[in-house]
Image: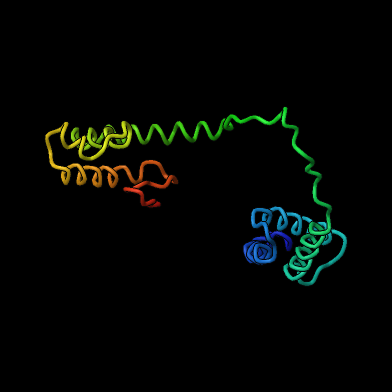
Amino acid sequence: MTGSAAWVVEGRSRLLTYVRRRIREPEQAEDIVQEAIMRVIEQEGKQVIEQPLAYAFRVADSVIHGRARRPAPDTGPVDVDLACALPLADEVLDYRQRFGRFQTALAALPPQRRAVFVERHLEGKSRSQIAEEMNISVEAVKKHLVRAMIDLAGCIDDLPIRLGGIVAHD
């Protein structure tokens, strides 16, 4: 393993942690570390560097400061004729996948619990209407709704679940 490769393997994670702490956009840390490593390796080809990892930290600072001095990209006003109100393709795909998981979980509920849930949340009926139609008590309807919400809780990943006006997150 060459000298360059050895210090990169040894210190890359430390350098990445250092960079993440020094910038506002942590998603740019990988790019900054890559650029710093590339500059150090290029410089090692021109001269001997006694402590390449320490030098990499200095180069990373230089890259961070250089990026901060760059002018912000021009994000002029958006042409309203080009704007589209439709969701992006990945949003549609995500929705369809979550909806599929919800349908599968709903189908797995016991029949009466599923019927109570559908009547209440999809058809908008009151608890007393459901109790009367199904010939069960309002308390039984409440119990079915709570258990249905518990059973369905994990099927839609990042969406909040509404429990009688209270929003519960996974």
- Which of the two residues, 64 or 73, is positioned nearer the viewer here? 73
Considering every residue shown, the one lying at the far top of the view is 81
Classify residue 42 by image quadrant: bottom right
Q: Residue at x 42, y 44 (%)?
A: 157
Considering every residue shown, the one lying at the far right of the view is 46
Quadrant (top left/top right/bottom left/bottom right) for the N terminus: bottom right
* Rendering coords of residue 4 (x, y %): 73, 61
* Rendering coords of residue 18 (x, y %): 66, 67
Classify residue 121 by image quadrant: top left
Q: Is residue 160 above or below residue 116?
A: below
Q: In this rendering, would 94 be left or right of 141? A: right
State how many labels appear: 0
Q: In this rendering, would 64 be left or right of 155? A: right
* Rendering coords of residue 148 (x, y %): 26, 42
Q: Is residue 154 above or below residue 44?
A: above
Q: Residue at x 80, y 64 (%)?
A: 62
Display colour scheme: rainbow
- Which of the two residues, 74 or 93, is positioned nearer the viewer here? 74
Q: Residue at x 40, y 52 (%)?
A: 169
Q: Residue at x 37, y 46 (%)?
A: 161
- Which of the two residues, 57 or 20, is positioned nearer the viewer here? 20
- Which of the two residues, 76 or 150, is positioned nearer the viewer here? 76
* Rendering coords of residue 21 (x, y %): 65, 66
Classify residue 90 by image quadrant: top right
